[in-house]
């Protein structure tokens, strides 16, 4: 199983995901969103499954700093903004082939490990 984890090194949930897969000796491809933002195509996969609202970290510092609390924007605007401002994303975004999770979702990750 080859797992791709999108997040930042400072995010505790991202560190949990990395530790979870590392402890199970899974091959991990980590994308640090501070160094390399996720592509729009990659984000679109997560938006299709979870919806754009689920991807936005409305409790995060970057969201408050940008003054987006009263922003009423369409999905296309959010997709563009999330690609440019990875600090607005709820992380980790984890992909295992076509299977996706958002945030710390150990129950789903355990299912992935059990089926491989």
Image (cartoon, grey):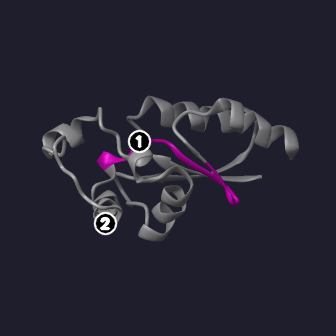
The answer to which quarter of the image holds residue 17 is top right
Residue at left 15%, top 46%? 66
Front residue of 9 and 39: 39
- Which residue is located at x 38 percent, y 35 percent? 10
Which portion, as a residue range, is magenta? Answer: 87-100
Reply above or below: 44 against 64: below
| Residue receiving disc 2 | 80
Residue 77 lies, in percent from the top left, at: 28, 64
Contact (CB < 8 A) between labels 1 and 2?
A: no
Q: Position of residue 88 (x, y in %)?
A: 31, 47
**Viewer-side residue, 39 vs 52:** 52
Q: Answer with left or right where residue 80 lies relative to residue 33.
A: left
Element assignment for label 2? helix
- How many other residues sit within 10 Å of disc 1, few (<14), some (14-19) or many (≥20)? many
- The residue that disc 1 covers is 90
Identify the element where label 1 is drawn.
Answer: loop
- Report if residue 93 lies within the magenta region: yes
Residue drawn at the location 43% of the way across and 61% of the way down: 38
Q: In the figure, 7 relative to 19: above or below? A: below
Crowding around mark 2 (Cα neighbors within 10 Å: few <14, some 14 to 19, many 20+) is few
Q: CA distance from mark 1 to mark 2?
A: 15 Å
Instruction: Point out the residue furthest to the right here.
Output: 115
């Amino acid at each position: 199983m080859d797992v791709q984890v999108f997040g930042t090194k400072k995010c505790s949930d991202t560190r949990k995901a990395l530790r979870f897969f590392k402890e199970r000796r899974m091959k991990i491809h980590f994308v640090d969103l501070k160094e390399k933002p996720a592509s729009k195509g990659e984000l679109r996969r997560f938006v299709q499954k979870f919806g754009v609202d689920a991807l936005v970290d409305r409790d995060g510092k970057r969201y408050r700093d940008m003054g987006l609390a009263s922003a009423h924007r369409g999905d296309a605007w959010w997709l563009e903004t999330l690609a440019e401002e990875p600090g607005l994303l709820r992380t980790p975004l984890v992909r295992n082939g076509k299977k996706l999770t958002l945030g710390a979702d150990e129950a789903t990750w355990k299912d992935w490990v059990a089926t491989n």
